[in-house]
């Protein structure tokens, strides 16, 4: 009989500590729920900012595409340049470069010898 009475007293004494444990766990749950709601609101703000950035970039892309199409239409409307004109301009550039390069060789041959060349005779 005494053995069972001792067991009842232990159960009675542990009951208040269980209530304390339950209260602390409930407080932890509330604080975690608050943190979760704050994190969710931050994520929602970040997502809305990203959505506005995406919308702005899409509108800029549309504008750029429209400008590119307009420029392409204008380029198609321009008359095509003659190919002979381009070749003439390139050939005249080659002639000028060739003569100037040839003149540079002549100038090098006529240049006076430097001090060291005169000293060693090369």
Image (cartoon, rainbow, N blue to C red):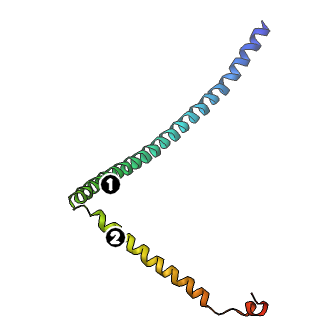
- Determine whether, in the image, residue 33 is placed left or right of residue 16: left
Residue 24 sits above or below residue 61 on the image: above
Task: Write down the quadrant of residue 6 in the picture.
Answer: top right
Quadrant into which the N terminus falls: top right
Closer to us: 118 or 16: 118
Q: How many numbered discs, if any?
A: 2
- Picture residue at 39% right of the left edge, 71% below the top: 91
**Percent x, y of residue 65:** 30, 52
Q: Which mark is residue 60?
A: 1
Closer to us: 46 or 115: 115
Q: Count neighbours of disc 1 (C-alpha within 10 A) and say few if under 14, some if 14 to 19, many if 20 or more.
A: few
Question: Mark 2 sits on what residue?
Answer: 88
Whether label 2 touches label 1, CB < 8 Å:
no
- Picture residue at 43% right of the left edge, 73% below the top: 94
Residue 42 sits above or below residue 81 on the image: above
Residue 55 sits above or below residue 18 on the image: below
Task: Write down the quadrant of residue 95 in the picture.
Answer: bottom left
**Percent x, y of residue 47:** 42, 45
Quadrant into which the C terminus falls: bottom right
- Picture residue at 58% right of the left edge, 35% below the top: 28
Closer to us: 23 or 61: 61
User: Tag 1, which secondary structure?
Assistant: helix
| Nearest to N terminus: mark 2 or mark 1 | 1
Closer to us: 54 or 107: 107
């Amino acid at each position: 009989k005494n053995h069972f009475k001792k067991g009842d007293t232990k159960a009675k004494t542990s009951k208040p500590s269980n209530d304390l444990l339950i209260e602390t766990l409930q407080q932890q749950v509330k604080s975690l729920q608050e943190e979760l709601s704050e994190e969710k609101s931050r994520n929602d703000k970040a997502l809305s900012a990203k959505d506005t950035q995406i919308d702005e970039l899409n509108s800029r892309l549309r504008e750029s595409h429209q400008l590119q199409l307009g420029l392409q239409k204008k380029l198609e409307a321009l008359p095509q340049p003659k190919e002979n004109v381009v070749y003439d301009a390139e050939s005249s550039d080659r002639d000028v470069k060739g003569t100037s390069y040839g003149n540079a060789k002549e100038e090098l041959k006529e240049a006076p010898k430097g001090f060291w060349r005169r000293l060693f005779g090369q």
